[in-house]
Image (cartoon, rainbow, N blue to C red):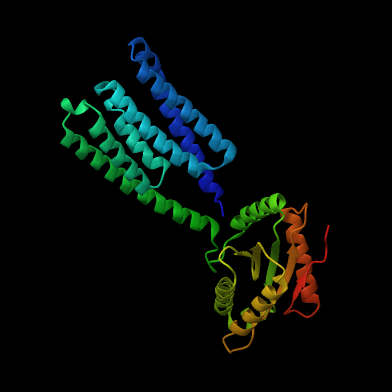
Amino acid sequence: MINQLQEKYQLSLLLLLSSLAIAGVFPFVFIRFFEGNIAAALIDVALIVGMAGAVAYAHLSKNIRAVCLGLAVFLNTGVVAVAIANGFNSFLWVYPVFASTFFLVKPIEAFAANVAGAIALALLSDIFVTVSLVSFFITILMLSLSAFIYASHSEKQFELLETLNTVDDLTGALNRRAMSADIKAALSTAERHGTGQLLVILDLDHFKSVNDKFGHTAGDDALKRLVSITTSKIRAYDRLYRFGGEEFVLLISQIDDQHQAFIDNLRSAIKQELKTPNGDEITVSFGIAHWIPGTTEDSWLQRADKALYVAKAEGRDRAVFCQQTA
């Protein structure tokens, strides 16, 4: 799943950093030009155009990860080139650019880029006639290590936020927020490529009697066990969501002609492995809807829900496919 929260965060961060960088670099285009340093002025112009183009492309393509990686390489290469072309007057720009790299890419990638940039400066620039090479490497190392620690901590915090934002805290299944985003993505893929997709609503049969007879703790355990059994039987790219109460939604992608056997095997596995505290079977009813052209999130769920209603009406512990084809 492409996480929309992370996508918006990265895009806004990319826009902010690029805006600040453009605002900082733009005056130097004129300064270098009037100083007669045409090479440095042209490099500054290239940086501005490159950053603006990268932001526009990221906004249109949504391929933010690739844009950030490319922009990090572009900026680090550009600031090294400017420092080599303009000497000591542009040398201090290395520090903020190297620090900003940690906002664009993964911490280990940013650290590697900074090391490569520092080595390039040491080999190609004459700045270190007046600046201590040892002091430069120590300060760059301290800057990179400090930013690495901060970026790594922020990455872990964001992963935790993503988990809290998308995972049901009782069962460990994905929640309805994640489901909605994934269904939209699945529909988009199906419309473009016509790939087979199944939406399945699972409902535990007579779940209220489990709570009434054994207590809500036993009911919660049954829900957790259902999730554990189901996730162990489905494929890595299939997704299970808690829809509400004892209802779950299963999104099955790239399904072939064996979908009936796939569902039947899953239903049998749940029936065999899911038990009450006294060893009785807990069965599950399935309502299944294929993707058809023109499907929306609501219509897909409605068709699966109608099939589930039929499964319940016909005696439960069965899988019913929606027959609607248009």
> Which is more toward the observer, 144 or 189?
189
Where residue 65 sits in the image (x, y, percent)?
49, 44
Q: Quadrant of the C terminus?
A: bottom right
Would you place residue 238 above or below residue 6 in this image? Answer: below
Q: Residue at x 58, y 89 (%)?
A: 278
Would you place residue 321 above or below residue 62 in this image? Answer: below
Give the quarter of the image for residue 88. top left
Q: Residue at x 36, y 10 (%)?
A: 34
Where residue 234 sits in the image (x, y, percent)?
60, 70
Would you place residue 123 above or below residue 300 in this image? Answer: above
Q: Residue at x 68, y 50 (%)?
A: 188
Give the quarter of the image for residue 86. top left
> Which is more toward the observer, 179 or 51?
51
Where residue 283 sits in the image (x, y, percent)?
67, 80
Give the quarter of the image for residue 101. top left
Q: What is the number of callouts on the image?
A: 0
